[in-house]
Amino acid sequence: MSDAGPEPDVATVDRRPATASVLLAVGAGIVAIGAAFTGGPVAGAAAATGVVFVAAAGATGYRRALSVGSAILFAGVLLASVSGASPIASLAGMGATVFAWDVADHGLDLGARMGRGADTLRNELVHAGGSLAVAAVGGGLGLGISLATVGGQPVTAIAFLLVGVVLLAAALSD
Amino acid sequence: MRPFDTRRWAGVAAVALVATGVGVLAEQPAAVLAGVVGIAYAAAARVGEAPAPSVDVRRTLSDPTPEPDDEVEVTVVVENAGETLYDLRLVDGVPPGLEVIGGSPRHATALGDGDSTSFSYTVRAARGAHEWGPVRAITRNLSGSWERESRKDVATVLRCTPSLDAGTELPLRGLTSRISGRVGTDLGGPGVEFHSERSYRHGDPAKRIDWKRLARTGDLATMEFRQERAASVVLLVDAREEAYLAPEPGSEHAVERGVDAAGRALTALLSGGDRVGVAALSPTECWLSPGTGRAHRRRAMELLADSPALAPTPPGDGFYVRPAYRRLRKRLPDHAQVILFSPACDDGLARLARRFDAYGHPVTLVSPDPTATGSAGATLATIERRNRLSRLRGAGIRVIDWGDEPLATAIAGARRGWRR
């Protein structure tokens, strides 16, 4: 015997992540794998492992798999960029990594709150478009810095520049 | 509601700094540059706030007054009359008594100024008046770092009144009023079935004189027939929280079945000439005194279909049996009998039934069986209920234990065990 009153449909709503976002995230993950491979097979393998986790999270809605997968993907891309990948590959890999996490996280959130039965395509595409624009601006900025410093300024100078930018951003926000 | 920080981007600046730091330590410019992407995301997360949406929401039903079990399509149109909403999620306030059988009452989209969107879903109509709740609108900024929830009230009501044509005859108990009807009594008088013969009294109608006897013996005698009189009946539906029971989630619960049975009994009893009233055991008031006639019939039907006391979802408030019993006893006409519709899954109800019976209102209990099988607890509940019903039978109350079979079958089965 059980109460039949409150919403019998709660259990039957499909709470898995929204499909378009998951597909975009996996696509971006494949771009990141490609970028990581330019820094060596170990980095590429690590990135691929991360993408497998991200895809698993996208299929099941298991949030921890997304965090772990994104972290591994990030580590793979970082390993590639310290072991000889070109600045362009590094920027593309990092942009694709953060984009993949952003889009997948959005898809998981939509799935958990709206359900897979709901029409969410437009929302997902707009969010992905916004995220892609940020990645493009960030990548373009990095590329500009890399071209401007081709003369051979020391690495620490760039680092100080970036730390300055972070502090500025933090100061402006609060 | 005030906007709040979703903390989505809480770690992205750290990601940027890790990349930069690792790049510095390894003296690799590429890694330092990779940090720029993280900084760009951190900066983007600070852009924009979750907008308070100024949207117009309209909701339309394909049929606002359907029959039970009809499919009704609900269409919600949302128009943005304000700033651009990059992330708008809508959750429609579907009434708890309706089941969504197609589509989804949720929708996520992005709307520019002046844009509109619509989504639709299908619900299965159930008895009662179902009122939609507000549409919940959740907005975020483009990066998803801020979120705000707001509500838009859109009044929509679906009214589903069953057309209760097919009545099911419920056998009544002996207590009757003085009006002629269909309940056989032990009194002699005008009627059909032979009852007794008595000596002639001046004024007896000529057609009831036993002429054969006069011819045989010369005595004048008058034949009497079993009188058939109308009863006064109150259909009492148990709609306490304890009665909202079903064998499994999603299946018809005992209150719904009770109301259905009460509706059929109402039709049959009224067309048989009995006076019928309606009442509910519920925290919400529901009472219609016994009566007859077309208008009364319509009122009773409306009460059964629409009354908030008999809503398809359980009442939130507590309910006390004792004061309700006292109120009902004051209202019940002296010669009224009670037909009680209840799953009888608690002792309070059984006590109430016995008390009515003891104070001269014969009780017939129609009990939709909500018990399930399969687990030890379910079996225990089944046995408890069965014992309770047999104790009630022992106390002289007529019990119709109504399982999955049609009500008429259950009545026929129960009838065999009754004494008059």
Image (spheres, rainbow, N blue to C red):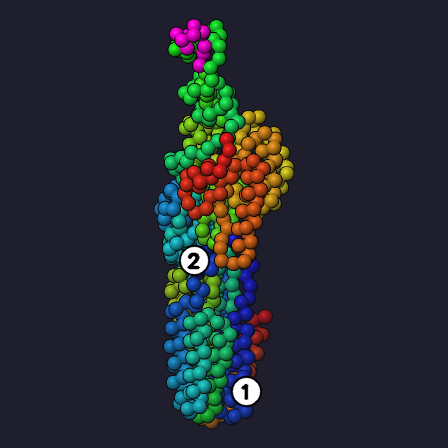
What residue is drawn where x is 52% and y is 53%? A1
- Residue B397 seen: yes
Earlier residue among tags 2 and 1: 1
The span from disc 2 to disc 1 (Cα, nearest Å) is: 44 Å
Residue at figure coordinates x 52%, y 81% from the top left: B16
Amino acid of disc 1: Gly
Q: Front-most of B222 and A103?
A: B222
Residue A10 locus on image (x, y percent): 47, 58
Q: Nearer the viewer, residue A24 or B290?
A: B290
**Residue A112 x/y as whole percent:** 47, 65
Question: Mark 2–mark 1 contact, CB under 8 Å?
Answer: no
Look at the image and give the residue range highlighted in magenta. B213-223
At numbered mark 2, what does the secondary structure look like: helix, strand or loop? strand
**Residue B47 vertical placement versus B182 (above, below):** below
Q: Secondary structure at mark 1?
A: helix
Q: Which residue is mark 2?
A: B106
Q: Which amino acid, by three-letter code, is at mark 2?
A: Arg
The residue carrying mark 1 is B21
Q: Chain of mark 2?
A: B
